[in-house]
Amino acid sequence: MIKVNLPDDTSTQSRTTLVQTSGAAAALLLCVGLVVWLGWLVLREIDDFSVANSDNLQWSLAQADVEFLQFRLAMKDAQDDPAAMEDVRRRFDIFYSRMVTMSSGRVFHTLRESVQSSAPRMRVLDFLETTVPLIDGPDEAFLAELPSLLSQSEQVTADVRAFSLAALSAFAEVSDARREGITELMIYIAAVLLALFIGLTLLAYAMFRLFRLAQKRADAVQFASTRMKTIVQTSPNAIVVTDEVGVVREFNTAAEALFGFTRAEAVGRLALELMVPAETLARHQIGALAFLDEHRRPRPEEQHFEITLQTRDLHLFPAEISADRAEADNALYVFYIRDISNWKEAEEQLTEARDRALAGERTKSEFLAVMSHEMRTPLNGLLGAMQLMRDHSLSTRQSDLLDRMQSSGRLLLELVNDVLDLAKFEAGKMKAEEAPFSINRLLDGLVETAQPLAQTYGNELNWRWCGPEGDGAIGDARRLRQVLLNLVGNALKFTRDGSVEVEVEYLDAAKTEVEFRVIDNGIGIAEKDLTRIFQDFETLDSSYAREAGGTGLGLGIARRFMRLMDGEIGAESEPGEGSLFWIRVPLTPVSDVEADPEEPRDCPDKPLRPLDVLLVEDNEINRFIVREMLEGESHSVTIAENGQAGVDTAAHHRFDVILMDISMPVMDGTTAAGHIRSGGGACAEVPIIALTAHALPEERERFRRVGMSACLTKPIERPLLLRTLAQVISGEIPAIPDDAPQPARAAPEGSARPPSAPEMPASGLLDEERLHAFLSEVPRAAAGKLLERFFAEMDRNIAALAESAPDDPDLAPVAHQCAGSCGPFGVEALRRALGSIETQTKTGRLPQRAELAALAELWEQSRRALEARLEAA
C-alpha cells in the first residue's frame, strides 16, 4: 500500500498562508468599506452646500426685513391713494411667501430649532395669519383697518428684525459647525487614506509572502513528486496505479519487468484485463477485488491478499498484493505487487520437509510399537524358559550359565524399557501422576533395592533428612523412585569401597519443594563433562564406566522425568573427590499416607491354591511358556487361540482367572474382554489380566474401560505372574499402571553407543541368536512339534497374504500372527516384511500388491535357510 504525503513543514506553511490570506482580504474589505462610507459623507456635504447656494440663506433673511418694510410703505401709500391697494396685496404676498419658505424649507430647519428666533418668527406668522383675511377681503374693509395694521406693523417690524438677526446668528453657528465638520471629514479622509495606504502596503507584503510560500510549496511538491517517482521507479516490486474504473495511470519499472508490458502499453488499459487471467477474472471480481467494482476503499482485511496473475506471455505466477484507495478529487487505487513464486516454492519445500519429519516420527513410533511387541515376545520366551529350567536338576556349571543368560536377558529388557520410555516422552504420551506417597518408605525401599549392588562394590548406602523431617506428599512417586534409583545406581557403580548417601531436605517452609541429593566419594566427574552426561547415549570414558556398561540413556531419561514433574536436575563434582547429584521437585505436602503405591499391600507371592486358568494367546511360543510356568505350580491351564475362542470358552465354563493377550486375529483382547464382561456368561465377573507388549497410557486406559483387572507386560516374569494372580484372586486388585511392574533396576550408564541389532548371516534371512536360543531352551520334542506347526501355518498364511488385496480387512491380523510366529524361530527378514505390512495397514496406508506378492518368494527362501540350519544342528 502506497501513501504519498507532503512534508510536515509544507502543511504548516499552507495553514500559515491561509491565515495570512484571510487577514489581508479582511483588511482590504475594511478599507474599501471606510472609503465608501467617507465618499457617502462627502457627497452628503456637497449636497448640503448645493442646497445652501440655491436658497442663499443669508440673502433670504436680509430680504425678509426689506420686503416687510416695502409692505409697510405700500400700506402708507394706499392710505393716501386707495388705488395702490394692488401694490399692498403684492407686497404682502411676497413677504408671506418668504416667511412660509423660512418656516417649511429644508435648509431653514436649523432656524426653526433656534430658541431665540422662534418667538419673533411666531409673532410675525401670527400677524400674517391675522392680516390674510383683510388682504383677501374687499378694499373697503382693508382700508378701514389700514391705520390699525400700520400701527401693528411697527411692532412686527421689530420682530422681523429680531427674527432676522437671531436667524443670522444661528446660521453663523451652523456655518462654523459645518466648517469644523468639513475639517473633521478631511481628517477622517486623510486617516482612511493613510490606513488604506498602510493596508495596501501590508497586502502587497502579504501577497509577496504568499508568492514566496507558493513558490516554496511548488518546490516542495516538485521535490516530493520527484522523490516519490524515484522511489516508485526504483522499487523492486511492481507498483500499479489505476483510476476509479480500473484504468492504469502509472506503471513502474518493476511492473514492466514483472508483466512484460512497457509503461506506454499499460497506461490507458484496464488493469484487471491486463494482469488477471480471464478464466479467474469473474471469480476475483466478486472475491478479493470486489472493492473495485463497488468503487470503495478496501477494508483492512481486503488490503492484503494473494492472487494468481499472468504476464504478457500468459505465464501464471502467485503474487501478493497490497491495495488501497487514495481519496482525492479523482480517486486512485494503488497496488503494490510482489512475485512470491520463490516463497511458495520454499513453503512447499518446508511443508514437504515437515511431512517427511512427521512421517519419520510416525515410522519411529511404528518401529517402537513393533519393537515393543516383537522384542518382548522373544524375551518372554527366553526369560520364561530360563525360569522353567531352574525347576530341573542343573549342574553348577549349568546354573552359572543360566545366571549369565538371565542377567543378559534382564539387561536387554532394561534397554527396551529405556528406549520405550524415551519414545513415549518424545511423543508426548507420558504424563505425570498425582498420588499420595510416603517419602520415608520410598527411600527405605530405594536403599533396600540397591543394597545388593552396594555390597557388590563394597560401598555403604544410607539416607537421612536434613533439617525438618516430613513424610507424606502428593506427586509421581514411581518416576521419582526411578530417577533416584538411577542416580544411586550410578553412584554405586562409580564408587569402590566408599559410601553413598541420599539426603532429602525441604527448600521452603511450606514444604512444597523438596531436594534430594545423592552424594558419593567415588571417582568424580570432570567439569567439562557435567553437562554432557545428561545427553542421550553419553557415557564416561573411564575404567569404571567400561566395567559398568550401559547405553547412556539413564540420565537423559531422568532429566526428561524431572521436566515432566516440573522439577530440575543437576550435578556437582570434582575428579577424585566424588560427585553430588541433586533433583528439586515440587510436591504437595499431605499429613496422612495410608499406603505407598510403590509397594504392594501384604499379599502372598503366589496363589494359595491351584487355579483354573484360561489363557487366550495366539502365539504358540507364548502359550507354551506361560502354560509351563503355571502348570509347574500345579495350576490348570485351558488354551484359547484367539479372542473369539476365548469368549466362547469363558461363556460355558467358569475359570478362576483369564489371561488375555491383546493383539490377536479374529478378535483382539480388548474386544473379547468387553464381550465377556457384557455377555452374562459364566466368567462375566472373573478377573481378566491383560498380556501385552504395548505400553502407552491410552492403551492401558482402554484396558480399564473394558473391565480388565490388571496388566502384565511381555516378557512375562514368573514371580510377577504368580504374585499378580495372588492379588486378583485375593481381592488385592491393583490399578493398571502406566508401565507394567518390573523388577527394580538402576538404569545403567556405560556403553558409548546403543546396542546394535543381532548380526544375521550373509543372506540376511535368519537371526542366528534367536534361533540358537530357541533350540537351546525348548526341549527337542516340543521344538519339533512347534516347527512342524510353524511350517504348516506359514505355508497356508503366506500363500493367502500373497494373493490378498491391499484393502483386505484380514490383512493386518494375519500379518501380525505370522510375524509373531517368525520371531522365536529367527526368521528375521520375513518378520520385518510382515511387520511393515501390518504397520502400513494400521496407519491407514495400503501396501503395494507387489509387496504382498513378494512374501511368497521371501518365505520360500527363509524356509530353505531355516531347514538347512536345523539340519546342520
Image (cartoon, rainbow, N blue to C red):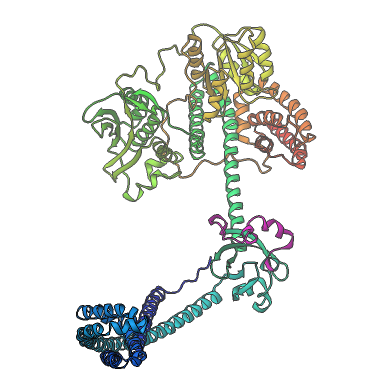
Q: Where, quadrant-wise, is the C terminus in this rendering?
A: top right
Can see residue 709?
Answer: yes
Can see residue 107?
Answer: no
Residue 431 position in % (x across, y down): 46, 32
Residue 199 position in % (x across, y down): 33, 85
Question: Residue 232's quadrant in the figure?
Answer: bottom right
- Residue 183 shown left or right of residue 445 in the figure: left
Residue 444 position in % (x across, y down): 32, 23
Residue 804 vs residue 108, the one in the foreground: 108
Q: Is residue 284 above or below residue 568?
A: below
- Residue 717 shown left or right of residue 469 in the figure: right
Q: Which residues are magenta?
A: 274-303
Q: Is residue 582 above or below residue 704?
A: below
Question: Residue 635's quadrant in the figure?
Answer: top right
Residue 301 vs residue 571, the one in the foreground: 301
Question: Residue 708's quadrant in the figure?
Answer: top right
Q: Is residue 629 above or below residue 870?
A: above
Residue 184 vs residue 243, the one in the foreground: 184
- Residue 124 shown left or right of residue 298 in the figure: left
**Residue lying at the far right of the rendered structure:** 803
Q: Is residue 285 above or below residue 607?
A: below
Q: Is residue 586 magenta?
A: no
Q: Is residue 302 magenta?
A: yes
